[in-house]
């Protein structure tokens, strides 16, 4: 049950990179909230013009959707990728999958926030999701006798 | 700080199974979006009849709610279960808890998506959530001197 | 690639504490739903007066927002904190960061649910988020040659 040190380091780098990226989405949402003066709870009111609610402005909702999509994809990647480390993968294969996932998810955020026309976002999403499913099936195959 | 190999393998199998299940929810949402021609961002528009927005169709929202419930329960399970591995649990106890959680969460998705009458969903949810709380309390008790 | 036992134990305690706290949010939402007789799916209907939908009551939505904020912050903390264990941090520094994060997130929930006036929630949120970013940058710096 040993993990290759070099493999772990590549995983740690990409895992941390994507999780920091996800945390930054909170600040991008906050920035939009201050710019639009629309907040989410009544105690957040800055002045008389502040609106309170969700779904009032698409620029705010866009950042929130991108953030939610990160939660749905980057969090499972971390756990599936971690289990994958224990399946004795080739370092080159694993590194390639981790880099592809990183690239796809960073592209996904940029494409979503800058409203790049489709199918850019679908492609970025699909690459990330298929990487997750790939990692998951590798783990399931490897540990299939431990159901 | 050693983890039993067999125990880890059971955990890895069920962890990967549930995370892949969670990732598949994205595809089920997409399927509903194409079927209903309702999307979430204006650049997703397929044709003139495409509607853009959230909350417009309950079949779509139902998959999204099931997905969110997975996030709220399966992601904590992975981390609590992982910490639990380090509390020297009996293999049979741990295996039973992991299998019960797996079964409850797969049942939860099926029950939610097929709109099985209550209390089916409440029961599936409660079993999963109590399994998480059980794992959490085992970890907290074991490491209580490390606050 | 060894982790200090004592360090791991402190991490395990705070990780489990915060994840159990997050799981409890589901029960607090359910409590509000029963109190207000407002549920989320049509099969949840208790009686003729039951309302079905989202956004109908701010007490319910408030718990859900607090829960979502936990997901956005506590889940990344667990993974970033775990990777941080492998960067040979000083035990005292790591313990301090974990305790600060724990305190900030427990304060965040209390402040949000009791509707304490701002800037209490912003401060609790910022401390937690900056702790995450700190952990992330420590990991990225340590593993920067493993891109």
Image (cartoon, coloured by chain):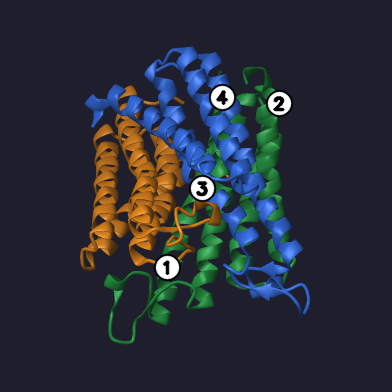
Chain colours: A blue, B orange, C green
Residue A23 visible in rendering: yes
* Foreground tag (4 vs 2): 2
Q: Name the residue under label 1.
A: B56
Residue C2 visible in rendering: no
Mark 4 or mark 2, earlier in chain: 4
Q: In the image, what residue occupies the spot 62% across and 31% down?
A: C84
Q: What element carries label 4?
A: loop
Q: Name the residue under label 3.
A: A69
**Location of residue A39 (image quadrant):** bottom right
Q: In the drawing, does residue B102 fall left or right of residue A1?
A: left
Q: In the image, what residue occupies the spot 67% across and 32% down?
A: C91
Q: Name the residue under label 4.
A: C3
Residue B116 rendering spot, x and y as whole percentages: 21, 63
Mark pair 1, 2: CA separation: 45 Å
**Location of residue C52 (image quadrant):** bottom left
* Foreground tag (3 vs 1): 1
């Amino acid at each position: 049950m040993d993990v290759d040190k070099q493999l772990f380091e590549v995983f740690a780098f990409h895992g941390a990179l994507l999780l920091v990226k996800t945390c930054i989405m909170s600040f991008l949402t906050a920035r939009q909230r201050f710019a639009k003066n629309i907040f989410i709870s009544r105690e957040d009111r800055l002045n008389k013009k502040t609106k309170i609610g969700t779904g009032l402005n698409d620029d705010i909702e866009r950042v929130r959707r991108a953030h939610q999509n990160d939660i749905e994809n980057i969090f499972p990647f971390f756990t599936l990728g971690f289990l994958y480390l224990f399946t004795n993968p080739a370092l080159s294969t694993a590194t390639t999958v981790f880099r592809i996932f990183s690239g796809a998810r960073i592209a996904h955020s940029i494409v979503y926030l800058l409203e790049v026309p489709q199918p850019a976002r679908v492609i970025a999403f699909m690459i990330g999701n298929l990487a997750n499913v790939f990692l998951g099936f590798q783990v399931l195959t490897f540990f299939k006798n431990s159901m």
